[in-house]
Image (spheres, grey):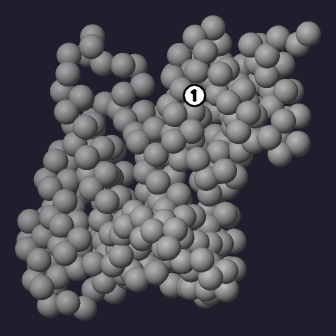
Amino acid sequence: MADYRKPASALRRAKELYANNNKQLAIETLYDIIKSRRHKTWTATHEEIMKLFILIAVDMRKNTFAKDGLHQYRSICQHSNTPNSLEEIVKYFLDLAEKKCEKAASQTTFKLESTQDLDEAYSAETIMMTSVTVAGDKERVERETLVPWLRFLHEAYRTTLNIISNNNKLERIYHETCKRAYNFCIKYERKQEFRRICQLIKKHLSDIEKYSGQDPSSKRVYNISLDDSVYERFLLTKFEQLKTAVKISMLNEGYKTIGEIHDIIGKIDNSLRKQLLVDYYSSLTEVRNPSFTHTHTHIFIYI
């Protein structure tokens, strides 16, 4: 009899269950391995398990499973010093979620109000589903097709950013994910979600600053050590954030972003590289609001 407590056996069993459309039991079988204290040393089988786990979690639109599984896998990768595998998995997660959302969007002409919160829209949809029984209700069907996937994808970005933040081996993928989240907000005109993503990224920088000041003996080896290069990477990300704010007409977030850019510039010890200045002013070319222009002048004087 197969011992499904072993990673390779559990993976084979989960593949069989998935092939027979028993997704719930398949994902539970995989999760038992991922969370097991007996299997905290990374192997290539762990990565295979995570890929199938993420595939099923996305198929079932199970945000909680995906989040918990990624937290467990981060622990495994940190314990075994295999950050490349974690990077591979989070990229795979976002690729799948983005494709699902794109497919849902292609199947409907329904367009959610840009200012409507996805959580509220999802709750409203749930109420509508219980009260409306006309199968031919086109708007109801189209909302049901699109809104849950928009919500899932937004949560996927937030989950990923939380999982890979403050890791010196994952800085590049962190900032790439920020840009993917910004593009999501532009593509689907998501204003409330953009605000939340901005707040999250700001918190992550604040956390890096907070933990960077700790006694070196109490810091984890993978935590980011603050220097000019760290701030410069956040600066480039903030430039993209400003462009996004303008494109989706979020002027208040644009003002906040300019202030954050100003603050970051003030924390860079050496003179700002010319290319960064070029990138900054390039990011302002789409701005036409006089108030933005006034603020830019003050930042230019400061520099």
Mark 1 is surrounded, within 10 Å at the Cα level, by few (under 14), some (14 to 19) or many (20 or more) other residues, namely many
- Kindly identify which residue carries mark 1: 73
Foreground residue, 67 or 284?
A: 67
Residue at left 56%, top 85%? 139
Quarter of the picture holding the C terminus: bottom left
Tell me where residue 269 sits by quadrant: top left
Residue at left 19%, top 59%? 260
* Total numbered labels: 1
In this picture, is 83 found above or below 254? Answer: above
Foreground residue, 262 or 101?
A: 101
Helix, strand, or loop for circle 1?
Answer: helix
Is residue 192 something one can see in this rendering?
A: yes
Along the horizontal axis of the image, is 165 left or right of 85?
left
Foreground residue, 293 or 85?
A: 85
Tell me where residue 145 sits by quadrant: bottom right
| Residue 259 x, y percent position in the rendering | 15, 64
| Residue 6 x, y percent position in the rendering | 77, 13
Residue at left 19%, top 75%? 252
Residue at left 67%, top 64%? 99
Is residue 236 something one can see in this rendering?
A: no
